[in-house]
Image (cartoon, rainbow, N blue to C red):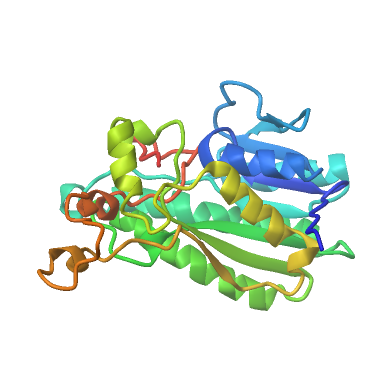
Amino acid sequence: MSLTLDLSGQLAVVTGGTRGVGAGIARAFLRAGAEVVICARRPPDSPVTAAGRSARFHPLDLREPDAVRAFFDRLAAAYGRLDCLVNNAGGTPYRLLGQTDADRHARVVALNLLAPLTASLAAYEVMRQQPAGGSVLMIGSVSGTRPSPGTAAYGAAKAGLENLARSMAVEWAPRVRVNTLVLGMVRTELSALHYGDEAGIAAVGATVPAGRLAEPAEIGDACVFLASDRAAYVTGASLLVHGGGERPAFLDAATVNQPTVNHSNVNHSTAFREAAAETPSIADTEAPKEN
């Protein structure tokens, strides 16, 4: 039996959907037949298109609650519905905890935790009045499940986002489903900034059991599934989309029980150092980490 995911007639909003992972998610919803609205502070360099259709862009700073509420009110008036919100926007600069004060770290938490909360609350006001309800998806990160040196506030925010989604799922059931995708490293147009040339990207990809970084389209396909009726009984869940995670570094440091394939020349520290799991499109004001 084929698995057909048809979202024709539905409306999906993807925050930070202008590039990277967010654009990949928007394209997946377009291919599934949904109407797609993307929002970010700046427009995309080129239209986000797929299957001969385009996502509609609306400028929005998710850190401004009044603007966010007005945005969803306008959507409800224009489209008469809202079926899925994907909280993708986020980001952080690389900065060790002791290199700045708590206020700077708080701004990272505000962008990656409070902004999705604000958007979700506004979307819920629309979805809860619909007979079919709706779906909220959080784009989480492996940074929220393991130490995140250099981007500790980001990791803490992503951990909080996953917990927030579970609480939303309970409070908003059964009308609105809420789930999290926990992403590992994704290959985007900005990967070279963090992993280097093709050799560096390949070396980082080799630290993942799947042998490579994810593609934005693969993240998008997972989002479409969770937004579809095929996932009607899935809520409060965390879907790991990380290619198997990361091979523990201690296994390669040991002098016994080594596999036939020698992983010792792979730079595992790079994978642990790179904290952001997705490509943010609404960035912190200070040199955002884009991965």
Q: Where does residue 254 sit, x and y in percent of width and height? A: 13, 69
Quadrant for the N terminus, please: bottom right
Residue lying at the far top of the rendered structure = 46
Question: In this figure, what is the number of numbered marks?
Answer: 0
Q: Confirm whether residue 136 shows in the render.
A: yes
Pick whichever, 237 or 90, lies toward us. Answer: 237
Q: Residue sitting at 61 percent across and 21 percent down?
A: 46
- For the question of whether residue 16 can be seen, the reply is no
Q: Which residue lies at the image location 46% right of the left edge and 52% below the top edge?
A: 112
Most extreme residue toward the front is: 260
The image position of residue 170, as x and y in percent, is 65, 78
Residue 186 in picture, x, y percent from top left: 45, 45
| Residue nearer the viewer, 54 or 31 | 31
> Residue 230: x, y in percent?
77, 65
Q: From what the image shows, is residue 24 above or below residue 10?
A: above
Quarter of the image with the C terminus in it: top left
Q: Residue furthest bottom?
A: 170
Residue visible at 77% across and 45% down in the picture = 32
Q: Relative to the observer, which residue lies in front, 95 or 236?
A: 236
Residue 275 lies left or right of residue 236; in this view the side is left
Q: Is residue 53 above or below residue 251?
A: above
Q: Is residue 134 left or right of residue 155?
A: right
Quarter residue 227 falls in: bottom right
Left or right: residue 154 versus residue 55 is: left
Q: Is residue 98 left or right of residue 151?
A: left
